[in-house]
């Protein structure tokens, strides 16, 4: 039967959408093999020190409790690559919330009750959890997250800045932020004849398998990790998290399948967070607005067990041209939970400060902030001097300005009022790098005319199955409905994680390669297919290893209209409009969903989300979604995402850039700039809660 | 989880009797707070007495034009009740400002009055808290207290009452009817919740075994307008930073009658008696309102990080009083 080719880009509905809304899609904690036991983790309640005793008599007396694992009796692990995985291996407590015991029982209720009966004794040492810009522990690391050099200097920033007739020197402060995906981190693990199977809530099960193989001293062929459906991760499931290790340990120790779900209240301390940053930005420009000097200096924290340095100064190396520039990162190792990846690590934080400073510069120059950005749009990447494979920033700014109705904007601050509401508009740029990793995939043509694609991709809610079917269908000149897509298991061809906005590019490239080979094979064949069909494979090792001579980034522009309650200081985002240049968009429906999702998360970053560490106890004080305020529907009123189709031949066969993260980048700055326009208040600290606005209101 | 018993009586007498029998018994309404606290280990009842089958789910008009609100009337039903909407818009507005649609559909009138503080130390059993564990200390005073009290707190406790509904009821001079082993009694809602003093473990004056059966609203004073306004950290589904419930009757430019209650600022809905006294007979002008509010807030004792609430509650109250003077006044819903 002939099939009409379906173009990529079509707004195809997610394949698993119905399964999800009807509850038949199974998540990691929804697998219950016979004999399953339930594990409840016990977090440390001190911020630094060691466990001197765990008295488990009362816990073990709880009916149903099988065992209590601690560093005294837990299976020994080989040293993991990531120190956060060395759980139950020593008495050391590096931060509040560090897992110190695991209670295993035949019901979750019994496990939890047992955990409550555990008597833990500690020897506390003094702790320090408070980041300051002059913290004595600050040092310059070799690299920031992502492998970027911590320090880059071009020309003589200080001389150039001092000579610039127009200067901005401002310091911006961001608190810790939490990923808090809807599905908490969970794993179900069981052993059969020496083979370990783990259903894990992860953004990439091959990486989880690798971690498990290393710490358990097993060959990867003895481990299967399945991440079939994942309820969001936002980076927090991009690296292996303790639940996979702990469930596997407990399953080995007890001989039963073990299921473990991190309770929401413990999540923030074990799954990473966006590290707080203190960012000094200095911009020097000539009287026409051309940047002469750009500096962004980051101060951030990491934990005492792991160096993770939020790469917040890295986007400044990409964004605007200037003869002289300095970008630096310094970090202090505090007694805090280990920070990690959170949606657009580096870009989200760094672009808040840089794009706020650009707005300050536009004000100082008396220049339109869109024009200022257009004027400083560089021809080559400022840091590397490489040409851009494509750079759509100017097009996004222009398109966005038109769509938003920016032209003719009155630049005066605090000049528009509608009833009780002070109105303002703001703009900010966005950028996110094009990343891609090696992937493999298999394509199969069955005798009945249908196709099957196999690749260990992970769907974290973005529609990976759907877009991979579209890519394969395009290569095979068939309808996507004829393509069965199997993802989410290490039994499938090896593939990288859903992270760094690189999943579709990485998996899709391998799928495209395998499907293209299959199409060629079918084209050569005459007559009916053999009963076993044809199978081809794709491996992008060579393609992805090649260094590109181009600087490759997605760009975007965000425009926000805010209303500030002149009585209370409450801020509402009336309109938020984003325009993106991210290569070819492969599925208009799921892409829009990712863009708008990022923008809503950006509203949270701007207005509602913030997490303080209690200096006395050393923990995050917000322990649930009632206290940690993610935006609700009433905060997300009119969100529009548009894009500019780019024809960039230097990316991958699909011509796509990543889209999962850029939506959050710049959103907070656009909102902050709009609040400044509305009120005249230049706040340099997020979130913009009423207490921060109040001092500036009449 | 600690195992607990569960009973679902159909008469109030039986409910009270069951409660007297078992130590550690708790009445269960919608469970929107109690069940959360059980999950956190803050509450460990031995017996839950589900009150939702008691005949307390009606709103009935009293002969004098007031309303008797059954304790198990759901928050959403109460907010939508035509008599409440017509006579006491402040109560509808307060209810709709609280929680989320789903929570309001299950939360009850009695349960709302008995909800506990959301102070993070109270909710974390690994930490000291005088309210949860008397004598253990109050880390909030020096710790995380941006959301906590500025009025009427004590060295032992700086918690706030989280209810929106109760603030409106305080401004409306509602009365709480209680049924206990020793019979019925009525307590004005303004005296129902306590200040913490040396016993912050006691949120209210309710006695062991007493059941809230009804809340009685007096008839609305003719010519009185009422309004509720809440300031919060996000547009919906957040507890009040501060809130204001007010009723106001103005005649010939002078305040004939005014009631004013603040939420989010104290261990109980804060009835602003001093401001009310200042307002009585005063000209209905922003200057007079400002004067009264400053007098009320003179006794505020903000903590290190919540001084903004003094300013915020004054601003909101001033605005609400101003709006009540001009009933056709400015819009209050977020402009979209």
Image (cartoon, coloured by chain):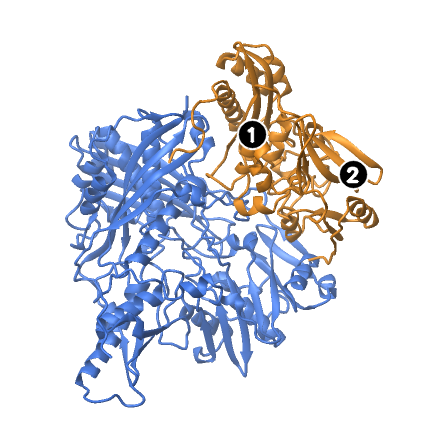
Label 2: how many Cα within 10 Å (few below 14, some 14–19, many 20+): many
| Image chain in orange | B
Quadrant in the rendering for residue A221: bottom left
Element class at badge 2 = strand
Q: Chain of mark 1?
A: B
In the visual, does A472 lie left or right of A564?
left
* Res B86 label: 1
Q: Nearer the viewer, residue B11 or A18?
A: B11
Question: What residue is at 27 percent from the left and 46 percent from the top?
Answer: A316
Position above or below: A649 against A536: above
- Residue A614 position in % (x across, y down): 55, 43
Question: What residue is at 52 percent from the left and 50 percent from the top?
Answer: A335
* Res A280 label: none
- Residue A493 position in % (x across, y down): 35, 76
Badge 2 is on which residue? B179
In the visual, does A367 lie left or right of A423?
left
């Amino acid at each position: 039967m002939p099939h009409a080719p379906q173009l990529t880009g079509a707004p195809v509905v997610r394949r698993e959408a119905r399964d999800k809304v009807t509850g038949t899609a199974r998540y990691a904690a929804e697998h219950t093999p016979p004999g399953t036991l339930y594990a409840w983790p016990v977090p440390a309640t001190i911020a630094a020190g060691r466990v001197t005793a765990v008295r488990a008599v009362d816990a073990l007396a709880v009916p149903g409790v099988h065992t209590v694992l601690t560093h005294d009796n837990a299976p020994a692990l080989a040293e993991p690559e990531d120190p956060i995985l060395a759980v139950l291996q020593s008495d050391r407590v590096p931060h509040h919330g560090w897992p110190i015991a695991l209670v295993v029982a035949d019901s979750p209720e019994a496990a939890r009750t047992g955990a409550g009966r555990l008597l833990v004794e500690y020897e506390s040492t003094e702790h320090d959890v408070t980041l300051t810009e002059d913290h004595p522990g600050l040092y310059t690391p070799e690299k920031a997250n992502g492998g970027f050099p911590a320090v880059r200097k071009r020309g003589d920033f200080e001389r150039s800045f001092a000579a610039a007739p127009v200067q901005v020197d401002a310091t911006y402060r961001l608190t810790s932020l939490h990923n808090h995906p809807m599905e908490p981190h969970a794993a179900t693990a069981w052993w059969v004849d020496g083979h370990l199977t783990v259903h894990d809530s992860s953004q990439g099960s091959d990486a989880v398998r690798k971690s498990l193989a290393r710490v358990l001293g097993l060959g990867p062929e003895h481990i299967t990790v399945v991440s079939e459906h994942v309820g969001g991760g936002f980076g927090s499931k991009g690296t292996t998290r303790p639940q996979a290790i702990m469930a596997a340990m407990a399953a080995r120790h007890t001989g039963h399948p073990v299921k473990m779900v991190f309770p929401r209240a413990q999540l923030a301390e074990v799954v990473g967070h966006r590290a707080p940053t203190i960012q000094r930005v200095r911009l020097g420009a000539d009287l026409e607005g051309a940047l002469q000097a750009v500096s962004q200096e980051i101060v951030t924290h990491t934990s005492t067990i792991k160096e993770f340095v939020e790469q917040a100064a890295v986007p400044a190396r990409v964004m605007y041209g200037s003869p002289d520039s300095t970008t630096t990162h310094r970090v202090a190792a505090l007694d805090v939970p280990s920070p990690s990846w959170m949606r657009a690590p580096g870009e989200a934080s760094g672009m808040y400060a840089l794009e706020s400073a650009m707005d300050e510069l536009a004000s100082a120059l008396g220049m339109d902030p869109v024009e200022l950005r257009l004027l400083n749009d560089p021809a080559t990447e400022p840091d590397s001097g490489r040409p851009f494979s494509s750079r759509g920033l100017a097009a996004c700014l222009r398109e966005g300005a038109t769509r938003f109705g920016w032209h003719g904007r009155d630049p005066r601050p605090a000049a528009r009022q509608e009833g009780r509401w002070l109105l303002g508009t703001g703009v900010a740029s966005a950028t996110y790098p094009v990343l891609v990793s090696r992937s493999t995939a298999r394509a199969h043509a069955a005798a009945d005319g249908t196709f099957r694609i196999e690749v260990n991709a992970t769907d974290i809610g973005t529609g990976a199955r759907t877009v991979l079917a579209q890519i394969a269908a395009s290569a095979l000149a068939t309808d996507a409905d004829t393509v069965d897509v199997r993802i989410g298991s290490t039994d499938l061809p090896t593939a990288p994680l859903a992270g760094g906005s690189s999943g579709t590019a990485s998996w899709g490239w391998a799928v495209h390669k395998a499907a293209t080979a299959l199409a060629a094979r079918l084209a050569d064949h005459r007559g009916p297919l053999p009963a076993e069909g044809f199978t081809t494979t794709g491996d992008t090792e060579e393609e992805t290893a090649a260094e590109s001579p181009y600087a490759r980034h997605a760009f975007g522009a965000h425009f926000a209209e805010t209303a500030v309650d002149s009585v209370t200081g409450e801020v509402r985002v009336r309109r938020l409009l984003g325009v993106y240049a991210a290569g070819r968009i492969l599925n208009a429906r799921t892409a829009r969903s990712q863009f708008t999702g990022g923008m809503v998360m950006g509203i949270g970053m701007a207005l509602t989300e913030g997490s303080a560490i209690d200096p006395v106890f050393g923990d995050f004080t917000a322990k649930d979604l009632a206290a940690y305020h993610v935006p609700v529907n009433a905060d997300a009123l009119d969100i529009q995402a548009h894009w500019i189709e780019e024809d960039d031949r230097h990316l991958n066969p699909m011509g796509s850039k990543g889209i999962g993260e850029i939506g959050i980048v710049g959103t907070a700055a656009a909102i902050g700039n709009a609040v400044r326009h509305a009120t005249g208040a230049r706040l340099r600290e997020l979130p913009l809660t009423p207490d921060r606005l109040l001092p500036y209101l009449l | 989880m600690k195992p607990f018993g569960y009973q679902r009586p159909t008469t109030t007498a039986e409910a009270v009797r069951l409660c007297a029998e078992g130590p550690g018994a708790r009445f269960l309404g919608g469970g929107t707070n109690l069940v959360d606290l059980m999950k956190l280990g803050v509450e460990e009842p031995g017996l839950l007495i589900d009150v939702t089958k008691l005949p307390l789910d009606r709103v009935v008009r009293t002969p004098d034009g007031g309303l008797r609100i059954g304790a198990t009337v759901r928050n959403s039903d109460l907010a939508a009740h035509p008599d409440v909407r017509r006579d006491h818009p402040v109560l509808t507005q307060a209810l709709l400002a609280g929680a989320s649609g789903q929570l309001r559909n299950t939360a009850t009138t009695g349960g709302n009055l008995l909800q506990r503080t959301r102070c993070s130390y109270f909710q974390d059993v690994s930490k000291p808290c005088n309210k949860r564990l008397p004598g253990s200390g109050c880390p909030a005073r020096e710790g995380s207290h941006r959301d906590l009290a500025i009025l009427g707190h004590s060295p032992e406790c700086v918690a706030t009452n989280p209810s929106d509904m109760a603030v409106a009821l305080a401004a409306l001079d509602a009365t709480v009817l209680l049924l206990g082993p020793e019979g019925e009694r009525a307590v004005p809602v303004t005296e129902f919740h306590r200040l913490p003093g040396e016993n912050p473990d006691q949120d209210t004056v309710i006695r062991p075994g007493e059941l809230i059966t009804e809340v009685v609203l007096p008839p609305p004073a003719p010519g009185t307008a009422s309004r509720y306004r809440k300031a919060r950290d996000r547009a919906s589904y957040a507890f009040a930073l501060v809130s204001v419930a007010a009723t106001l009757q103005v005649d010939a430019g002078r305040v004939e009658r005014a009631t004013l209650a603040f939420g989010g600022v104290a261990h109980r809905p804060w009835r602003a008696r001093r401001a009310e006294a200042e307002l009585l007979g005063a000209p209905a002008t922003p200057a007079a309102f400002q004067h009264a509010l400053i007098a009320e807030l003179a006794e505020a004792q903000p903590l290190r990080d919540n001084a903004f609430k003094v300013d915020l509650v004054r601003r909101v109250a001033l605005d609400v009083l101003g709006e009540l003077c001009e009933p056709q006044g400015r819009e209050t819903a977020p402009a979209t």
